[in-house]
Amino acid sequence: MARENILKRKKHIQEPRPRLSVYRSLNHIYAQVIDDADSRTLAAASSLDADIRKDNLGKKEDAARVGSLVARRAMESGVTRVRFDRRRFKYHGRVKALAEAARQAGLDF
């Protein structure tokens, strides 16, 4: 049953626009805008980037800064609409903060 739900969710997010993929580890958060048609990364940001790491404001605030940074980098490469791929992570806490900051920075999803 769980496997069917995963496959259903995965099929649902397969649309022809780039994907904003989020990975959350215990200490850091990573985001990439990926073009699956060409199999290449268009923009990426993480809490390990120098401009985010220099001011350690906390995990949730760093996630929001990663969201705005990846949105800015995506828009510089010409991407304004993405689909949000949170993988197995709940839309809560750091993942939600990243998504909301990316929306406020101009990404549409």
Image: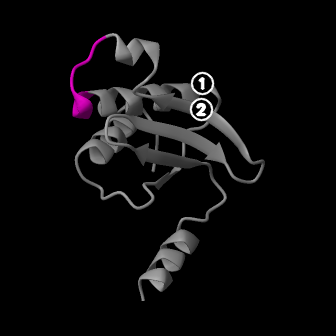
| Quadrant position of residue 62 | top left
For residue 104, above or below residue 13: above
Relative side of 75 to 2, left or right: right
In the rendered structure, which segment of residues is drawn in magenta? 55-61
Residue 90: within the magenta? no
For residue 52, above or below residue 19: above
* Mark 1: amino acid: Glu
Q: Residue at x 30, y 56 (%)?
A: 91
Q: Which residue is mark 1?
A: 76
Relative side of 106 to 74, left or right: left
* Mark 2: amino acid: Ala
Relative side of 32 to 108, left or right: right
Q: Residue at x 39, y 27 (%)?
A: 47
For the residues labelled 2 and 1, say whether their Cβ atoms are less than 8 Å apart.
Answer: yes
**SS type, badge 1:** helix
Q: Quadrant of the N terminus?
A: bottom left
Residue 58: within the magenta? yes
Point out the frontmost of discs 2 and 1.
2
Q: Which residue is mark 2?
A: 43
Q: Position of residue 20 (x, y in %)?
A: 52, 46
Label 2 to label 1: alpha-carbon separation: 9 Å
Q: Position of residue 50 (x, y in %)?
A: 44, 13
